[in-house]
Image (cartoon, rainbow, N blue to C red):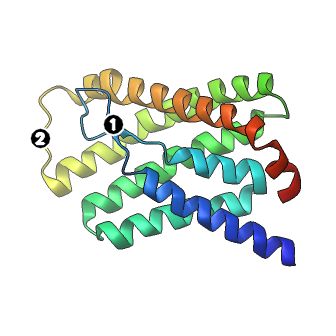
Amino acid sequence: MKKSWRNLTIAALLGAMAYLLMYIAIPIIPIVPYMTLDFSGIPILLAFLIFGRKDGYVALLIKELLHLILAGMAISNLIGVLADAIALMVFIEIFNYFSKAGTQHYIQAIMVATLGMTVIMAAANYWVITPLYIKVLGMKITIPLVKMVLLGVVPFNLIKGIVIGGLTTLLVPKLRKVLTVAR
């Protein structure tokens, strides 16, 4: 019981760290300047790797709730939080499914998870997310939606998956003692 509270506390701290890392945001694709690469996925992925699914989702939930509470419950924030949560959940679930101990397996899992996240987020942006921004917020797009998804959303998610997965994989060996003690 004591260990589960400890794990939950550390997962909550990782969620808070992820929230703070959201503010180091870099726009990387000019067609979709509102989609920014941040490093908040790293602590979330670490929480999943260290503590498992339950505490990983606690970290994700804390990150998203902190963002909504502190940034406001505006519809644009709600849509953004939903999109971010979906992207991270898809990436992490696929990564967990395909990863085994060892860097070689992590690299393969990152590639598969990145492709899966890219496909899901391209579809979500084409059919749900971007149409919501257009309808609810009056967002204007200057190119056809399919072109925006193919030239903006797809490369963004490919880059995001490789960066988040790659940096996390570099951190895992450094945290090997923590990984062993926490479980």
- Image quadrant occupied by the N terminus: bottom right
**Residue 6 x, y percent position in the rendering:** 77, 71
Give me the residue at 59% from left, 33% from top.
167
Disc 2 or disc 1, which is closer to the eye?
Answer: 1
Three-letter amino acid code at the position of disc 1: Ile
12, above or below 183, in the image: below
Asked if disc 2 and disc 1 are in contact, CB closer than 8 Å, the reply is no
Q: Left of 89 or right of it: where is 68?
A: left
**Residue 121 in the image: x percent, y percent?**
45, 38
**Real-space CA distance between mark 2 and mark 1, rounded to the nearest whole angstrom:** 22 Å
Disc marking residue 69: none
The image position of residue 56, as x and y in percent, is 67, 57
Please state the total of marks drawn on the protein image: 2
Choose top left, top right, bottom left or bottom right for residue 5: bottom right
Q: Which mark is residue 140?
A: 2
Taking the image as drawn, is residue 183 in sight?
A: no
Judged left or right of residue 178, residue 14 is: left
Residue 23 visible, this angle: yes
Residue at 26% x, 27% y is 148
- For disc 1, the marked residue is 26
* Up-down relation of residue 13 to residue 143 (above or below): below
Height in image: 40 above or below 10? Answer: above
